[in-house]
Image (cartoon, rainbow, N blue to C red):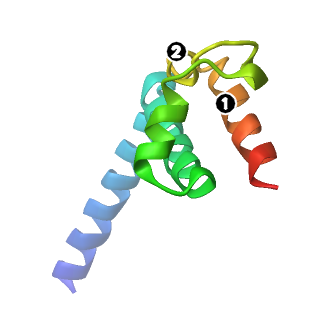
Amino acid sequence: MKKQKRQVGKTLRLEEVTERLLSNPMVRLGYERRGIMLLAERVLGTPAAAAQWLTSPQVGLGGKVPTELLRSAEEAPQVERLLKQMQR
């Protein structure tokens, strides 16, 4: 019984830490970036094609480079929206 209580206590603390981390905009942006990079690989077919696309100016982004937009929590969603449009 004591072991279970300790494990539950550790789990609760881990959940609290995770919640605090994800409430940080910079940490959350890191997770979003990773998701966008995976989406780019899925849409474009290969990691190399995704890397090329992410580092080149894109007409659908007004000539902006996706990796530059991914630096901002406000602009990152533009990249995701464009990739989802391309996915259709």
Residue contact between numbered discs 1 and 2, judged by CB atoms under 8 Å: no
Residue 3 image-quadrant placement: bottom left
Q: Residue at x 41, y 45 (%)?
A: 48
Task: Indicate whether 50 appears above or below 45.
Answer: above
Residue 77 image-quadrant placement: top right
Rendered image: mark on residue 79? 1
How many labels were placed on the picture? 2
Three-letter amino acid code of the residue under disc 2: Glu
Residue farthest to the left, as pictured: 3
Q: Residue at x 63, y 53 (%)?
A: 43
Q: Position of residue 57 (x, y in %)?
A: 61, 18
Task: Indicate whether 63 appears above or below 78.
Answer: above
Q: Position of residue 9 (x, y in %)?
A: 29, 63
Quadrant containing the N terminus in the rendered view? bottom left
Left or right position of 3 against 19: left
Few, some or many residues within 10 Å of mark 1 (<14, 14–19, 20+): many
Q: Position of residue 17 (x, y in %)?
A: 35, 43
Residue tagged by mark 2?
A: 68
Left or right position of 37 against 44: left
Which one is nearer the viewer's eye here, 57 or 83? 57
